[in-house]
Amino acid sequence: MSLAAETRLAVDRHPFLLTALRAGVVNYTAAARYLDVDGETDAIATALRRYADELPAYETESRDVRVRMESGIEPLERDEDGGGSRHSSGDALVAVGESSFGPGGGDRTAILATGDVDTAGLAAVLERLSLEGISPEATAMSHETLVIVVRRRESANALRAVESALECVGTRLE
């Protein structure tokens, strides 16, 4: 495999570096040192420059979404025998594996975004929440709806983070 091909594969394993190359904000020599590619740093840096020249420019777009909070969310419990939920399945805002969350007076808040929501928007939201130090207890997405469950004390910051993330979602590579 050529050095250029090996460098591209290494970059593709680090999405943040791919985004930085598209945005034109990379110190190529430092990136070459960072990557686990056998070869001279200058040659790897040159391969990075050439790869960056071929990539589409990084652009963002705002999403047409409505973001709101729903307080009083709690885990929905199962029956003692492990059977169905004590709540009706229609009560759950989020159900992932054996866990489900829905209204019931709990100490959690659901942040709901409806509208132009997709996986790129979800990725932007999760990255922004991570940067804010917020770890959602549950997350789900389906056609035009994104739900994030957080502790009530984090809800205002989570709401702002979700709104901010969806105002500048990076465009996908195509």
Image: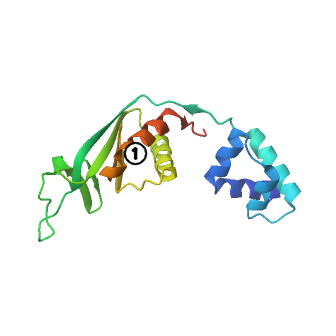
Q: Quadrant of residue 113?
A: top left
Q: Disc 1 residue type?
A: Ala
Residue 102: image x %, image y %? Answer: 21, 50
| Labels in figure, total | 1
Q: Is residue 7 left or right of residue 172?
A: right
Query: Looking at this rendering, what residue extends furthest in the front direction?
Result: 153
Looking at the picture, how far across and down is residue 125, in whole percent?
A: 46, 44
Residue 159 spot, x, y in % from top left? 38, 41
Q: Where is 88 relative to 98, above or below? A: above
Please give left or right for residue 116 compared with residue 48 in the image. left
Q: Is residue 82 left or right of residue 20?
A: left
Q: Is residue 54 above or below residue 101?
A: above
Residue at left offset 25%, top offset 56%: 100
User: Outermost residue, bottom direction?
Assistant: 81
Secondary structure of the residue carrying numbered label 1: helix
Mark 1 lies on residue: 158
Callout 1: few (<14), some (14-19), or many (20+) C-alpha neighbours within 10 Å? many
- The residue lying at 62 percent from left, 51 percent from top is 15
Residue 118 visible here? no
In the rendered image, the quadrant that contains the N terminus is: bottom right
State the quadrant of the C terminus: top right
Q: Position of residue 84 (x, y in %)?
A: 14, 61
Q: Nearer the viewer, residue 134 or 54?
A: 134
Q: Which residue is drawn at the image coordinates 69% and 54% (left, top)?
A: 11
Res 130 visible: yes
